[in-house]
Image: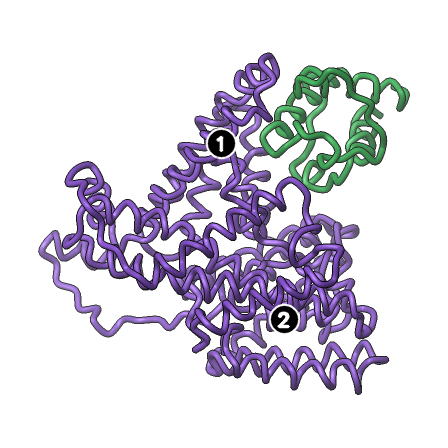
Chain colours: A purple, B green
Amino acid sequence: MVVNSVIFWLFFAVVSIPYFVFFRKSCRGQNLWLLLASYFFYGWADWKMIPLLTIITVVFYWLGLQIEKNNVDNPKRASHLTTLGVVLGVGLLFYFKYLGFFVQEFAHLFDSFGLKTNLSTFSIIMPIGISFFTFKLISYVIETHRQNIQPSRDFVQFATFIAFFPTILSGPIDRPGEFIPQLSQSRKFNYDNVAEGARRIVWGLFLKVCIADRLFGYTSAILDNYTHHNATSILIASLLYSIEMYTDFSGYSEMAIGVSQILGLKVRENFHRPFLSQNCSEYWRRWHMSLTTWITDYIYMPLNVRFRDYGQYGMYLAIFINLVVIGAWHGANWTFVLFGAYHGLILVIIAATEKRRRKFEKKYSLKKKAYYKYPRMLLTFFLVTLGLIIFRANNLSECFDIIHRLTYNYSFPFTNKTTFVFGLPFILLLIFKEFKDENKYNIHFLHSKRLPIRLMSIFLLLICVFLCGNLDGGQFIYFQF
Amino acid sequence: MEKNEIFEKLNEIFIDVLDLDECNLTDETSANDIEEWDSLSHIQLIVAIEKAFKIKFTSLEIMKWNNVGEMVNSIEEKLK
């Protein structure tokens, strides 16, 4: 049941009507109802993993209470319990996501030494959404240990935070300190919330079905069969894949945020117009923000603090590890590690030249100059696209082969009517909106002060969705992670 | 050392590390208020503060700070 399918909207209607009608005065009732709906939603995707989700939720609930109990009287025990929580969360992720990969890699290694292994039956089924909910669980124990939050004393509330259906499959990754307090008061039907939520859903739907799904046909046709295409086609497909990736994932995030907002719950933002970034460091502050801020808070900063006595080099190492972890988080494949290392290297170069660059920009007042800003945006987009070629490739040799093929054989590209006739005008609309919003957010189109413009924008977007879109509930790229 | 002396010294450190023209820190100032104060420069600030006050923070102390006020409290604790 994905958010761009009719069945999801039926489910959402069945959830929200009792939520706002029968339970409107009972916070506990609303939470319990949300929890049941979330488990039903998760069970619909993968019912066999419900016991795992339940048990792990109980364990972390208990850990939170124990950590708080020991934080003052027995800090050592609190620290051990936090470590246990982190190891448990990382261990789960490792077992389900990476163990099979490492076993296979070792098997290949042994085979290359002539040692026979028989691992054809070894496979572990990965619970859907595990990369997202384990990160919520880990942040819960760390924040409790840092005494930034009080652990939840209401199990239903805590379990709802972990399993919250709009975000469990693909984020945004919420933080306990921001989300749980919202569950301690009942949520009333609020027109502004519902209107804004609906606007974000419509925009998300447009991004997903009118842009991402349109581009998918072209990018997969070329990149899955790149040996049959010339460099021009591969280059165009790669550039379009960056836009497909962005619209697919930010489209999902917009819908998840919109659905939550209708229910009266604010979840983390995930994207902030990343392709308007002027360098890759800024890009990572604007792309998949709920993941990058998580990794910054719980991996980068602790490493940086640890390495601070090594000066600049300690910081570079922390940056590099940070990006490799972000890459590897996406899955068990060396391409993801290389993707992370590639961005890590770029960010280290940016960090090493940061001070000089800032001085230079200040001296010549360059920051807002168009001739300085736009070429940098374009360069960042190209660098991100190169990274996504590594990201998308099935293995390292394919990735190097694609990059090699980009260096020769430029001729007339393969064209496809569906992509170029429908996709390109929508992309232009997206670019136009991104630049408008960057200058001043929330005043254009869907957010115009004039009601006719707002209604017209929604109406036109919906027409595009129904006429050009594909509403069969196509999968989102990020579900696989 | 008095609290206002700590703030005075911190202002100097922030101006120097973040390359600011001026800086008026208060208890509530956080990274959201100063554009140049990001995750990269944060660690340089910590190193500079430790050096200037001749103190050493633990990782947990650093991770707990949400604003300059909490940072100043940690410095005061260490100087006692």
* Residue B14 higher or lower than A230, as above or below: above
Which residue is drawn at the image coordinates 66% and 78% (left, top)? Answer: A35
Q: Is residue A62 visible?
A: no
Query: Could you say where residue A7 lies in the image, as x and y percent from the top left?
Result: 53, 83
Residue lying furthest left: A114
The local crowd at label 2, few if under 14, some if 14 to 19, many if 20 or more residues have their Cα within 10 Å, is many
What residue sits 87% from the left and 18% below the top? B5
Chain containing mark 1: A
Residue at figure coordinates x 35%, y 57% from the top left: A420
Q: Looking at the image, can residue A159 be seen? A: yes
**Label drawn at residue A374:** 1
Residue type, numbered disc 2: Phe
Q: Are marks 1 and 2 on the same chain?
A: yes
In this view of the protein, which residue sits in the foreground, A81 or B34? B34
Name the residue rendered at 22%, 49% in the picture.
A413
| Number of numbered discs on residues | 2
Q: Position of residue A65 (x, y in %)?
A: 73, 64
Identity of the amino acid at label 1? Tyr
| Residue B71 drawn above or below residue B14 | below
Say which quarter of the image contains residue A368: top right
Q: CA distance from mark 1 to mark 2?
A: 40 Å
Q: Secondary structure at mark 1?
A: helix
List the residue tagged with mark 2. Answer: A164
